[in-house]
Amino acid sequence: HSKEELMKLMEQAIVERDNDRLGFMKDFFKEGSLCKVLVESKAEMVWLSDWHTSHECTWAISIDREKKEVLLSFRGASSKTDWAHAFDTKDTATSNPIKEDYPKKPKNIRLHGGFHKYLFRVRK
């Protein structure tokens, strides 16, 4: 395939989320990488926050409806502030932010302390 043909195939498969057609991509990524996990799963990307990558956290949410799993991914640390949050490893309890009811829904959840402080901070 030419570069243009490959890009068109990838775009069409992603838009249609045709997992059988995305299989060829699994060899593009390192074992254990987030991209490899996403390509091999039936997960759908439902949100990507990458508007201000120089001063905001870059993160993504994907869901795998078959496995009933949610995958929350963060870009690695790229600044001193990022590293400070990354090393704040003490878990923090917070109320479950999901409004809808579901079986065995916990009232509270536990998050990595640094992620909690970053995600739930008061913004200007």
Image: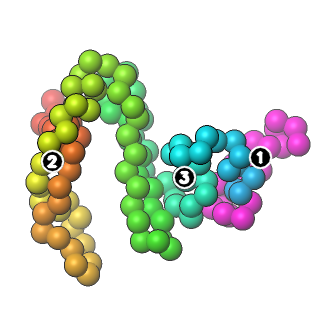
Callout 1 secondary element: helix
Task: Name the one closer to the observer, 64 or 98.
Answer: 64
Comparing labels 3 and 1, the label whose residue is closer to the camera: 3
Amino acid type for the residue under numbered disc 3: Val
User: Looking at the image, which residue is at 80% across and 43% down?
Assistant: 6
Amino acid type for the residue under numbered disc 2: Asp
Give the residues in magenta.
Answer: 1-21
User: Looking at the image, which residue is at 26% across and 81% down?
Assistant: 103
User: Looking at the image, which residue is at 53% across and 43% down?
Assistant: 33
Q: Image quarter for residue 13?
A: bottom right
The structure's colour scheme is rainbow
Q: Image quarter for residue 100?
A: bottom left
Name the residue that disc number 2 marks.
91
Amino acid type for the residue under numbered disc 1: Lys
User: Looking at the image, which residue is at 48% across and 65% down?
Assistant: 64
Q: Position of residue 3 (x, y in %)?
A: 82, 36
Q: Quadrant of the N terminus?
A: top right
Work out whether mark 1 precedes mark 2 in sequence or the reverse, and give the earlier one: 1
How many angstroms separate mark 3 from mark 1 (CA)? 22 Å
Q: Which mark is residue 8?
A: 1
How many angstroms separate mark 3 from mark 2 (CA)? 25 Å
Q: Image quarter for residue 112?
A: top left
Residue most extreme to the bottom: 103
Tell me whether the residue at label 1 lies in contact with that at label 2, contact meaning CB atoms closer than 8 angstroms: no
Work out whether mark 3 precedes mark 1 in sequence or the reverse, and give the earlier one: 1
Numbered-mark total? 3
Work out whether mark 3 precedes mark 2 in sequence or the reverse, and give the earlier one: 3
Q: Main secondary structure of the magenta part?
A: helix
Please rate how many residues cluster around mark 2, counting C-alpha atoms within 10 Å: few if below 14, some from 14 to 19, many from 20: some
Whether residue 89 sits left or right of residue 31 in the image: it is left
Q: Which mark is residue 37?
A: 3
Q: Quadrant of the C terminus?
A: top left
